[in-house]
Image: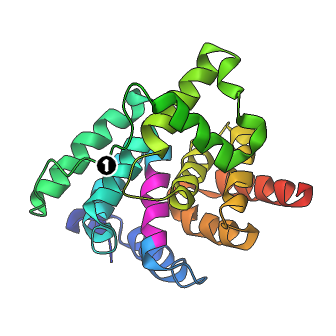
């Protein structure tokens, strides 16, 4: 598989050849990550590093392993971590590709909360993911309340993908975004609690390398190792 167009393959033939061999042969075959998980990781990473052109090129292939609902949930949830300023173009790009693939939009609703229960449900999700110390976390400030009601109440409670997958994609957003090591550490621990163990997350980072580069990949591995030493 190659995401380079014919002109790029002609004008940059050496680069496109060795990059394709690395990204689409060596890396996918380097560990036991299955295709579904790999494309979850790639799409979330491309959102985090703002690789919209690569996202559009990869998405049709990703849709062979992921459902449209799963893809939409990856895009939607990224808003809580990247902000709408970064995510807005990806919403349009996702719709464009899905229409080209003949997918009927809009997709069925995945929401499970309403304005009356989103705070409670979101706070419960935080407790389930991070522990009992999160029970009254939302009371500390407006931002803490936003986190409970919006980040967890509006996004994490949605159907389409489970907590284990949601924590994985959050890990990928944060690792790809960079400069969020404290949050990455917290979500690394949450991944451990959901069964995404140290080896699995290191294998995940290996799949991210072609898309986010080595500095952020090495930073992510350092965070994984540090958290693993503390649990």
Look at the image and say whether residue 173 sits in the magenta stretch: no
| Foreground pick, 208 / 166 | 166
Residue 43 is a magenta residue: yes
* First to last magenta residue range: 37-46
Residue 92, x across and y down, in percent: 22, 41
Q: Secondary structure at mark 1?
A: loop
Q: Is residue 88 left or right of residue 80?
A: left
Work out which quarter of the rendered image holds the N terminus and state it. Answer: bottom left
What secondary structure prevails in the magenta region? Answer: helix
Query: Horizontal and vertical percent for residue 98?
Result: 17, 56
Q: Looking at the image, how many numbered discs can be counted on the residues?
A: 1
**Residue 231, quarter of the rendered image:** bottom right
139 sits to left or right of 39: right
State the residue at coordinates (74%, 59%).
Answer: 221
Percent coordinates x, y for residue 3 in the rendering: 31, 66
Residue at 15%, 47% in the rendered image: 106
Q: Write down the quadrant of residue 209 in the picture.
A: bottom right
Q: Is residue 190 visible?
A: yes
Q: Foreground residue, 183 or 167?
A: 167
Q: Which residue is mark 1?
A: 110
Residue drawn at x 54%, y 85% is 29
Residue 136 vs 78, above or below: the answer is above
Place residue 13 in its image quadrant: bottom left
């Amino acid at each position: 598989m190659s995401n380079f167009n014919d002109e790029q393959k002609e004008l940059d033939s050496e680069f496109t050849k060795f990059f394709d061999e690395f990204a689409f042969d060596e890396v996918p075959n380097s560990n036991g990550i299955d295709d579904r998980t790999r494309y979850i990781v790639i799409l979330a990473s491309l959102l985090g590093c703002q690789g919209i052109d690569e996202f559009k090129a990869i998405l049709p292939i990703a849709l062979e392993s992921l459902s449209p609902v799963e893809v939409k949930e990856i895009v939607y949830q990224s808003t809580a971590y990247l902000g709408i300023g970064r995510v807005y173009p990806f919403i349009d790009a996702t719709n464009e590709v899905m229409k080209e693939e003949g997918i009927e939009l809009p997709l069925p609703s995945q929401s499970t909360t309403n304005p009356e229960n989103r705070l409670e449900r979101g706070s419960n999700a935080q407790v389930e993911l991070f522990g009992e110390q999160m029970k009254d976390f939302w009371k500390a400030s407006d931002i803490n309340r936003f986190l409970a009601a919006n980040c967890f109440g509006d996004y994490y409670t949605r159907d389409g993908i489970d907590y284990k997958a949601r924590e994985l994609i959050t890990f990928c957003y944060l690792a790809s975004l960079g400069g969020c090591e404290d949050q990455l550490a917290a979500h690394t621990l949450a991944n451990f609690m959901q069964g995404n163990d140290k080896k699995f997350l290191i294998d995940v980072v290996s799949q991210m390398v072609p898309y986010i580069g080595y500095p952020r990949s090495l930073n992510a591995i350092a965070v994984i190792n540090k958290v693993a030493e503390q649990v």
